[in-house]
Image (cartoon, rainbow, N blue to C red):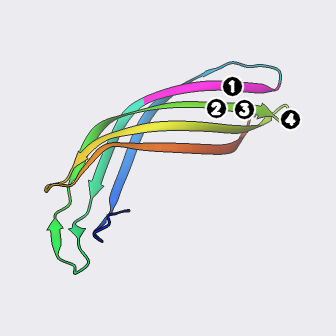
Amino acid sequence: MWRSCTDHEQNLGSGRCNVNGELDQTCAITEPYTGAGIGYSRLETGTLSTTGGVASESGASSDNFAWSLSAGLAMSVTSNAAVDVNYRFTDLGEFKQAGTTEFDNLMVHEFRAGLRYSF
């Protein structure tokens, strides 16, 4: 949700589908890797409303090219399990609503941690 100092409220929803690839470099117990992806994003907003409930702009949707870059490190804890920490940057594209509201270069910054298990 986005809020401005004039007390407008706006919801922005997004969905994306990416194809990603990773390049691993296996060391003793650590495995650094980098990745990149390309895909599609769909951005949607509802009606922009003010404090009094008066609609000032109707909602809209946009289909965009999306891309991402990532880097991480997996650290082995057993022969089958590793702790994984990584960062991923995703660019979802631009979006303009029916009125004057614009969202330029919507980006996602993700810091993630997880557990990998190999069978």
- Helix, strand or loop under label 1: strand
Q: Quadrant of the N terminus?
A: bottom left
Would you say 100 lies left or right of 86 here?
left
Q: Which residue is mark 1?
A: 32
At label 2, the amino acid type is Gly
Q: Which residues are magenta?
A: 29-37
At label 4, the amino acid type is Thr
Q: Position of residue 90 (x, y in %)?
A: 44, 38
At label 3, the amino acid type is Ala
Name the disc covering residue 72, or none. 2
Mark 3 and mark 2: Cα distance apart in space: 7 Å
- Helix, strand or loop under label 3: strand
Q: Kindly indicate whether the residue at mark 3 contacts the one at mark 1 (C-beta within 8 angstroms).
A: no
Please give the name of the residue rendered at 63% of the width and 25% of the height, measured from the top-left corner.
33
Between circles 4 and 2, the one closer to the viewer is: 2
The image shows residue 15, relative to residue 40, as above or below, that is below
Disc 4: CA contacts within 10 A as few (<14), some (14-19) or many (>=20): few
Please give the name of the residue rendered at 25% of the width and 63% of the height, measured from the top-left corner.
46
Q: Which residue is mark 3?
A: 74
Q: Which residue is mark 4?
A: 78
Disc 2: CA contacts within 10 A as few (<14), some (14-19) or many (>=20): some
The image quarter containing residue 9 is bottom left
Q: Quadrant of the C terminus?
A: top right
Mark 4 and mark 1: Cα distance apart in space: 17 Å
Q: Kindly indicate whether the residue at mark 4 contacts the one at mark 3 (C-beta within 8 angstroms).
A: no
Q: Kindly indicate whether the residue at mark 2 contacts the one at mark 3 (C-beta within 8 angstroms).
A: yes
Would you say 35 lies left or right of 45 here?
right
Front in this rendered view, residue 91 or 118: 91
